[in-house]
Image (spheres, rainbow, N blue to C red):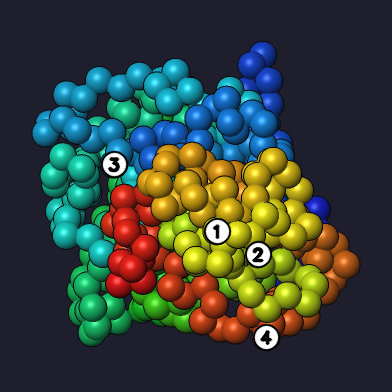
Amino acid sequence: MRLRFEVTALGSAGGPRRGMLEIDRGEQGSTRVETPSFLKYTRHGMQPHLVPEVAAHMDEQPAATHVQLEDFLDEHDVEKRKFTELRKLAGIDRADMILLDVLDPTITMRAGKSGEKFMGVDSEGGLRRLTPAAFVQAVNALGPDVAVAPADYVHEAQPSLTHGKRIAKSVARSTRWLDETLAGVAQAAVFAPVMGSLSPEQRDISAQALAARDGVAGYVLNDVALSADDRMWAAQRSLTLLDPGKPRYMAGASSPDMALRAVLSGVDLVDSSYAYAVTEQGLASAYVLGGTGTSAHVDLWQDDMAADFGPLVPGCTCMACRLHHRAYVHHLLCAREMLATVLLQVHNLHCFQRFFADMRDSLARGSLATDAARFIERYGSDAFAELSQLAEQVSSPTTKIQRQRHA
């Protein structure tokens, strides 16, 4: 298996870019993903609220799927866990590129602490100690196309983010675990997490170490515990030192405003968890990169939706909007019917896909920075803040009562 990435258009040095990511599996075919784009977010390897039969009727989504290993760490002794090939286990399309990360990108606060020889992982079965050897064993059994090496992520608050030995220790551990991963993984391309938190010195040390390793196929920016502004500072600090010919994935930057900021900084991939967060609140996405609209979402819980027989969002061409209306989805939500979240997820992913297609078109015109500024001006800087962290969503709208939704 070979991973190739080509930058096809560059907005400015160190800025936004278009590219083509290709996975060549030899006789098993190849997969191409045009960037900037997103990885389809999953839980236990499956897209939330979507079965393959429904997904098959949706508008074309990128052939790229994100899977987190922590969903499968149910055995207390991780090294004794027997894994099945991911495509068989979760029914993932064989044409999709699968990126296997250790952590769920939507969870920002974690209790697990790492040690010298293991990464602490908060799995559904409790705290797990994941060694590089156990990770390599899992990767070789699960068979993803891309594997993100384990890392000693820092979740402590200031001042340990900028001072003391904690960050330096994190960088050293992560670099060592990366080398063990590169030496053990048989087929998958390895993406390396960029470390250093808010320490300029340590971010430079980490980026330079990764850039010097030929076996690294791409980079991961995973600073989800930081504020949005700090995360963008950290990304921009590191990206200038990394190989520009390799793809960059930013974890947890899936809200439209954060995705725009990430892409403008030179990021190629994010995840689609924002679409899921919107669905979980019973909302239909209405944001577009161009146009004149000022409402980012339509609230299907509102009482006036009961008599509204228009599409979820006027002008939308998704399956949910073509075949159903607001009143029907409102009824499904109030009746706690699972179909409500299925239809909303179909629509919200369609909107998310269209948003990225518009970004690529805007990049081709050389107007992304201007279009992004107008987008934020139209919708406001706080339009996406409430839904940007999926970790705050404790249950599906089908299990809530309406008056508790904004509690």
Q: Amino acid at mark 4?
A: Glu
Q: Which is more toward the observer, 273 or 205?
A: 273
Q: Is residue 310 above or below residue 328?
A: below
Label 1: which residue? 306
Contact? badges 1 and 2 (CB < 8 Å): no
Q: Secondary structure at mark 1?
A: helix
Q: Secondary structure at mark 3?
A: helix
Label 3 vs label 1: CA separation?
40 Å
Label 4 vs label 3: CA separation?
38 Å
Q: Looking at the rendering, in which quadrant would you find the N terminus?
A: top right
- Crowding near the residue tagged with mark 4, few <14, some 14–19, many ≥20 C-alpha atoms within 10 Å: few
Label 4: which residue? 377
Give the percent coordinates (x, y) of residue 232. 51, 75
Contact? badges 4 and 1 (CB < 8 Å): no
Determine the residue positioned at 28% across, 78% down.
161
Q: Nearer the viewer, mark 3 or mark 2?
A: 2
Q: Nearer the viewer, mark 2 or mark 4?
A: 2
Give the percent coordinates (x, y) of residue 25. 62, 23
From this viewpoint, which residue is outermost toward the right?
Answer: 365
Label 2: which residue? 286
Q: Amino acid at mark 3?
A: Glu
Label 1 vs label 2: CA separation?
19 Å
Q: Looking at the rendering, in which quadrant would you find the C terminus?
A: bottom left
For marks 4 and 1 on the same chain, the one whose residue lies earlier in the sequence: 1
Q: Quadrant of residue 45?
A: top left
Q: Amino acid at mark 2?
A: Ala
